Amino acid sequence: MMPTSVPKPPASAAFRSRAEDVYDQLKHDIAAFTLVPGDRFTENEISERLGVSRTPVRQALTRLQQEGFIEVLFRSGWRVLPFDFDRFEQLYDLRMVLETTAVQRLCTGTAALAQPLLDSLAAVWLVPAAQRSADTVQVAQWDEAFHCALVVGAGNAEMARVHREVTERIRVIRRLDFTQQPRIDATYDEHAKILKAVQRRRADQATLLLRTHIETSQKEVRKITLHQVHLARQNGQGSRRG
């Protein structure tokens, strides 16, 4: 019997995979202020730095352009755009509607209350202070999981899908809320209060707590973002200014 050969994935799939890697890296560079607003760069520079061909680089850049993070310059490569806080605030508004609606459904019983889901959240957020994580990356991931779980628990798949898209689009600045220990402590405290209110089916209280939590985070993120951009420019980070 002839050995069965494993077919190779189509080239387009390989390009998509590499383009995803390039996209993730460039979005991380923007979020970490390695690339700051005003920085200019070319496809060749990115291709050489990341060791990939120009095709996946161009695909990744086009995606970032569509999301409003960069712009193409006529015969001059690409430029990182200033953070569009108006757009982020619109996304936060949408997030607010989705999450508060989800919490109301969880509390009033109009959605199937997923007790195992709430128990898993409690295991992370309802812990003694000594057991809290100080890992900023981990806390940021747990924070996203907390808010996504609330929406998933409401039982509306379309709400959950839209919420995931919003979460992805605000991640680049939202993660900054966990670069300072006081904000991590506040997140633990606020999540615990929200979770307890949901467990007790107190819809009005849970909604108010959640709304205040999101609004506070939004204000802090904007303040931290502006400060980080200022520091990055002072320290001369980024590739080229123009």
Image (cartoon, rainbow, N blue to C red):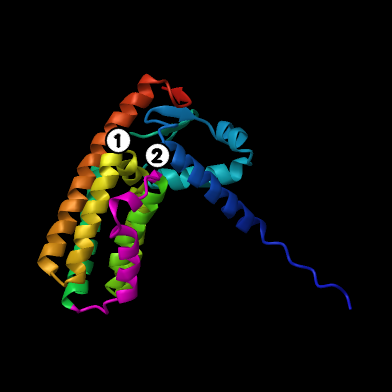
For residue 168, say whether it is visible.
Answer: yes
- What kind of residue is marked 2? Ala
Position above or below: 76 against 155 = above
Question: At 30% from the left edge and 40% from the top edge, which residue is drawn?
Answer: 181
The residue stretch that appears in magenta: 109-136
Horizontally, residue 180 falls left or right of residue 18, namely left
Would you identify the image quadrant in which residue 39 lies? top left
Picture quadrant of residue 136 = top left
Q: Secondary structure beneath disc 1?
A: helix
Find residue 110 and report its horizontal and vertical position in percent.
20, 79
* Image coordinates for residue 97, horizontal then vertical, percent: 20, 61
Question: How much space separates mark 2 and mark 1, taking CA atoms?
Answer: 9 Å
- Number of the label disc, if any, that sits on residue 225: 1
Label 2 Cα crowd, 10 Å radius (few <14 / some 14-19 / many 20+):
some
SS class, disc 2: helix
Which of the pair 60/74 is nearer the observer?
Answer: 60
Q: Which of 182 and 63 lies nearest the eye of the viewer?
A: 182
Tell me if 232 is positioned left or right of 55 in this view: left
Residue to which mark 2 is pinned: 31
* Image quadrant in which the C terminus is located: top left
Residue 101 shows up from this direction: no
Is 86 one of the magenta-colored residues?
no
